[in-house]
Image: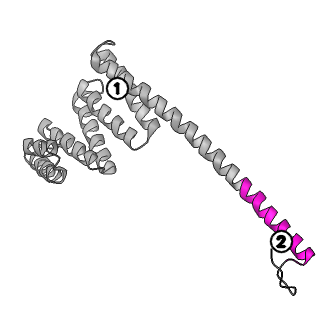
Amino acid sequence: NNLALLLQTLGRHGESETMSRRALEGYEKVLGPDHPNALSSVHNLAAVLEDQGKYDESEKMWGRALEAHEKALGQEHDEVYKTLKRLAGLYEKQRKYSQAEEAYERVCTGFSKTLGKQHPTTLECISKLMELQVTKSAAVRTSAIDTEVVINDVNNRRSLRDRLRELTWLRGRRGLGGGKSGKRL
């Protein structure tokens, strides 16, 4: 497990992933899937998968760690909130803003209860939540603008198509269509 962390720190993510998987497999086999060492390996694997952009697999690992922590420690424990914070960050990277916001809200509320409202970790979480809400709001505005641009584009194409039909009709009436006279516009 320590070697996997070192490899990850060195940016050797592929090797770190391999070592994390081996460590997890060993811990699960010897100590069981809910043992703290096994959960530590789940965390490490989730992080290295996230670093490699393997978000779906990382999300499953973070979810697994969260579920195990909640089962072992209860829903209102710092380890649960730390894991949920990592999952929220992953949701944000995936642009799953609603899920990220929900997770950050739970984390902020939890840290506020366990650490206090003025604790740096609580304040950092609140800051992340506020940043996310701004990002989410901007994404919604951008989406609305994109929709308007597409609608305008479609309307412009329609009017351009109508103008081309009119021009073709006029050319035909004036004998400018390139028919028998050979004249073209």
Mark on residue 60? none
Q: Earlier in the sequence, mark 2 or mark 1?
A: 1
Q: Position of residue 133 (x, y in %)?
A: 47, 29
Q: Amino acid at mark 2?
A: Thr
Boundaries of the magenta span: 155-176
Q: Is residue 3 a member of the stretch shown in magenta?
A: no
Name the residue tied to disc 2.
168
Of the 4 image quadrants, the one containing the N terminus is top left
Name the residue tied to disc 1.
107
> Going by the picture, which residue comes out furthest to the right?
173
**Left or right: 100, with 44 as reference point:** right
Q: Position of residue 141 (x, y in %)?
A: 57, 37
Q: Residue at x 76, y 63 (%)?
A: 161
Q: Within 10 angstroms of label 1, few (less than 14), some, or many (20 or more) residues?
A: many
Q: Position of residue 37 (x, y in %)?
A: 12, 38
User: In front here: 79 or 1?
Assistant: 1
Where residue 71 sits, quadrant-wise, is top left
